[in-house]
Image: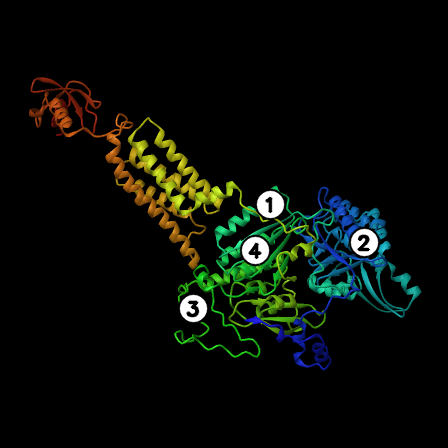
Amino acid sequence: MALSLRNLAPPCASAILAILALPAACVGSAQAPGPADPSAPTARLVRLSLPLLGDDDASFQQRLERAAIRLQAETTEGARPLLVIEFQVSDQSAPTPFERALGVARFLVSDRMAGVRTIAYLPQSITGHAVLIALACDEIAIAPDADFGAATAADDPNQGVEPGMVALYQQIVASRRSVSAAVVTALLDRDAELLRLETDAGLRLALRSELEAVEKEAVVASQEVLSPAGQLAKFSGREARAEGLVQYLAQDRQALARALGLGAGDLLVDQSLAAAWRPVMIDLAGPLDMRLVRRIETLLANEIGDQRANWICLRIDSSGGDPVAGLRLAQVLADLDANEVRCVAYVPRRAEGPAALVALACDQLVMQSGALLGGPAAEDDAADNGFAEPVVRQPEAGQPEAAPAADKPPRPNDARPLGAPPRLPDLKRDQDSLIASVRGALADKAERPWSLLAATVTSGPALQRYTHRETGETREMNPTELAEQTEPEAWQPGATIVAAGETLTLSTDTAVALGIAWREVDQADDLVELYGFESLPPTAEPNWALELVEGLASPGLAALLLVIGVVGLYIELSTPGLGLGGFVASLAFLLFFWSKFLNGTADWLEALLFVAGVVFLLIEVLVLPGFGVFGLGGGLMILAALVLAGQTFLLPKTSAQLDELRDSLATVAGASLFCLATGFALRQYLPRSPLFRRAMLMPPEEADRIEQERRETLIDYSHLVGRRGVAVGDLLPGGRAEIDGEIVDVIARGELIERGDPIEVVSAHANRVLVQRVRG
């Protein structure tokens, strides 16, 4: 259901309703934001990837300095801009060395960073010496459930903490006055015991060793152990905020931006603060399938790796497609390093179904006026989307509900659209698999609620806008994700974005109002002004290599390569020693599998199946002729390799995969039929061709065969059949035997016969006499 702005309360109404404490006040949290506050500070966000290894600390200091210079240049005189440092831990088991953390901390408290206000943002748990970097910032913001502390957790506990390290920590903290010296000691020293003391002068944090001195200065009414001796001090986000160790609690960037008085789109990773943008646009047009995904992946690799592009705009105009393909592309885009590349999704018309998932996986989403995000796939793409669910669009406010067409009676919500492919029996399982994939790494890297992402490709529970009663954080969640929160009862429900049983459908103004889209533009040229380009970025085009690979991997050329390969093998077997057919066949099969490898549909499994199948066929023909087990098995392995080389799955689960399997089978079947016809024609032509007739192994003509048999029968021993004699020498298996007083060259059948053993003639053809030992 498309959510209209008319369903959202204006700012003044929300305020009045909130004061009157009416239940409808929760709807106001989803309203369109008011105009930007001109007094709001300028802000940038820089991501710190942990651990810091090698020269990571030096490169990060350069990035900080570039950010500070740019911020101060954009800020009016007298104002102090904000520089948010977002801590991102890629490997919790790999600690940051103290020397690397100290270098960054010293830079943060130096005069070069004095012109900006630094804020450490900890969306996940931070331990080890990376804590020192956070303490060197002016303020700290942390997620409520994240942990902070245990600065020497990775150091050897048997050696104790070095006094020099404690002194350096104290020096950094003293310049910021963010936490007390007692807390710093507890973060570093396992033997220290940290207490919360309630005195007549107020609350105070002190070490157990300082208790006597404190009691001399004030009356201690009560004491509580915050961190016992024997373990390093570590605080959750809520505990750190309660003790005054951090200044903000923020579950995500949106909540942090609100706490800092910024807009939702002001805190974005800016990886090009010192260098000019190197922008490029990539088109995603038409139904989304694996072939299109592989093309975009190749273009991304070329532009980022070879052309060093750091601003990628994915121009999306798609009416749906394969959800699995959309999930794969979304994961690729989410995996891009935000410190190096900014990925922007631009939707001029529509991004429906899986294309909406791809758009939400980008760093920023820009929509053109009148565009549509989400919604069901178009009818002409229904066959490509095995997960498509019918969506009943609700009428706009004040408009009558459209009556069903006379020739199409209304159907219930669970009925499939007329003309659409039948539902697969494992659809529910596949939807669960998609949701599980979205809930995993994709939601974390895309930094969006998994409920919102899943609503683009699956239909399920209602998606609502929730507001946290304490922090004011807003989030789109369904009941399942709400139940996963630490305090579900603290989230107050608001506007319904997606009704139960429907997929996400948002207009441009609604997506911008909800903060799902970053900006609205009137045309593509507005991107130039929005990002400060001189002109519209160029569109990436596939190079000749990509065009060649896609051409060779197309069904028509793939079938032609198979035909050429089989015909080449036939010619080689018919003309041994020439080598031309074998060379052409090898080249054709190499091109076939090479194109499939680069196109992403073939892997080592297909190559091994093909090679093993050929080997088994050769074994059947040359080594072990018999029941045909090797021949039949080898032929089936070759067919399986050729079919699997044209698809990305083993067994089809969606209608799109069924279509892909159909194309793959059609390619192999068509090539097989053409090979049979070509082989029959070549059998008739090659023996008579001037080039091959002298090289081909063909059976003799009928007259030649009769003459050959006549010549072979000039010496005839057929009269000896059934006669007996004695071996005059060992038959191994050939030798001589005396039969009716005549010495004859004979061959033993199936056994070795020693000299003097009695023998019997069992057959004779021309001069070839076959004998066996007489037993008994």
Q: Amino acid at mark 4?
A: Ala
- For the residue carrying disc 1, how many other residues have a C-alpha within 10 Å: few (<14), some (14-19), or many (20+)? many
User: Which tag, 2 or 4, sits closer to the chain's start?
Assistant: 2
User: Which tag, 3 or 1, sits closer to the chain's start?
Assistant: 1
CA–CA distance between discs 3 and 4? 27 Å
**Position of residue 349 measured from the top left corner of the image (x, y, whole percent):** 56, 61
Q: Is residue 123 above or below residue 61?
A: below
- Identify the residue at horizontal 53%, vertical 56% (top origin): 327
Element marked by disc 1: helix
Tag 2 residue: 72
Q: Nearer the viewer, mark 4 or mark 1?
A: 1
CA–CA distance between discs 2 and 4? 35 Å
Q: Amino acid at mark 2?
A: Gln
Tag 1 residue: 303
Tag 3 residue: 417
Tag 4 residue: 330
- For the residue carrying disc 3, how many other residues have a C-alpha within 10 Å: few (<14), some (14-19), or many (20+)? some
Q: Amino acid at mark 3?
A: Pro
**Position of residue 594 measured from the top left corner of the image (x, y, whole percent):** 46, 40
Splitting the image into 4 quarters, where does residue 22 fall?
bottom right
User: Which tag, 4 or 1, sits closer to the chain's start?
Assistant: 1
CA–CA distance between discs 2 and 1? 32 Å
Q: Nearer the viewer, mark 2 or mark 4?
A: 2
